[in-house]
Image (cartoon, rainbow, N blue to C red):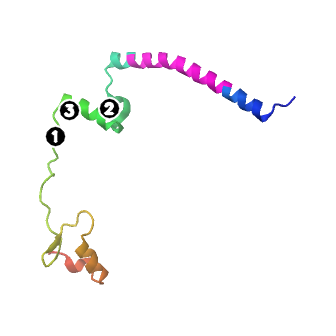
C-alpha cells in the first residue's frame, strides 16, 4: 500500500534525527584524530586553512617574527595631472575637480604634467 505524504514526512524526520545522532557520535572521534595529528605534526593554522584565516594566522605570525613594513609605503608619488592648484597622482578614484572638467568635454591629456 502507498504511503501518504504525512507518513513520508514523519519517516524523513525520524531518519534525519538518526543521522544527526550518528554524526554527533562520529564527530567526537574525528575531532580527537585531528587534534592528535595537529599536535604530532605541529600543524599551524596557515598550513591547515591557508591565508583565509587571517585573524588566527596573524597572531601566530606575530609570535614567530616581527612583521616587515612595505618599502614603498609612505613614499610620495609624482603628480601626473594638474589644473591650477588642483593635482592628482593618477592613483585611486578621479578627484571631483577632474571629473567635472572631463564632464565639460576636456580630455585627460589636457591636464597631464610633462
Callout 2–callout 3 Cβ contact below 8 Å: no
Q: Position of residue 111 (x, y in %)?
A: 20, 78
Give residue 36's quadrant in the image: top left
- Segment colored magenta: 14-35
Between the C-alphas of marks 2 and 1, the distance is 18 Å
Does the magenta portion include 52? no
| Number of other residues with Cα within 10 Å of mark 1, as a class: few under 14, some 14 to 19, many 20 or more | few
Judged from the image, the secondary structure of the residue bearing numbered disc 1 is loop
For numbered disc 3, what is the local secondary structure? helix
- The residue identified by callout 3 is 62
Residue at image x 32%, y 32%? 46
Q: Quadrant of residue 39?
A: top left
Above/below status of 113 relative to 27: below
**Disc 1 designates what residue?**
68
**Of the residues under marks 1 and 3, which one precedes in the sequence?**
3
Reading the chain from its start, which is encountered first: label 2 or label 1?
2
- Verify CB contact (< 8 Å) between mark 2 and mark 1: no
**1 vs 27, nearest the viewer:** 1
Q: Please give the residue where the numbered disc 2 appears in the rendered image.
A: 46
Q: Position of residue 45 (x, y in %)?
A: 33, 29
**Up-down: is 7 above or below 32?**
below
Alpha-carbon distance for marks 2 and 3? 13 Å
Whichever of callouts 2 and 3 sits on the residue coming sooner in the sequence is: 2
Amino acid at each position: 500500500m502507498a504511503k501518504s505524504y504525512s507518513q513520508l514526512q514523519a519517516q524523513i524526520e525520524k531518519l534525519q534525527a538518526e543521522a544527526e545522532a550518528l554524526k554527533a557520535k562520529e564527530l567526537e572521534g574525528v575531532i580527537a584524530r585531528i587534534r592528535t595529528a595537529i599536535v604530532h605534526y605541529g600543524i599551524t593554522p596557515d598550513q591547515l586553512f591557508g591565508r583565509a584565516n587571517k585573524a588566527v594566522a596573524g597572531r601566530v605570525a606575530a609570535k614567530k617574527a616581527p612583521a616587515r613594513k612595505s618599502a614603498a609605503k609612505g613614499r610620495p608619488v609624482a603628480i601626473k595631472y594638474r589644473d591650477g592648484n588642483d593635482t592628482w597622482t593618477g592613483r585611486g578614484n578621479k578627484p571631483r575637480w577632474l571629473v567635472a572638467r572631463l564632464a565639460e568635454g576636456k580630455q585627460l591629456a589636457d591636464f597631464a604634467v610633462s
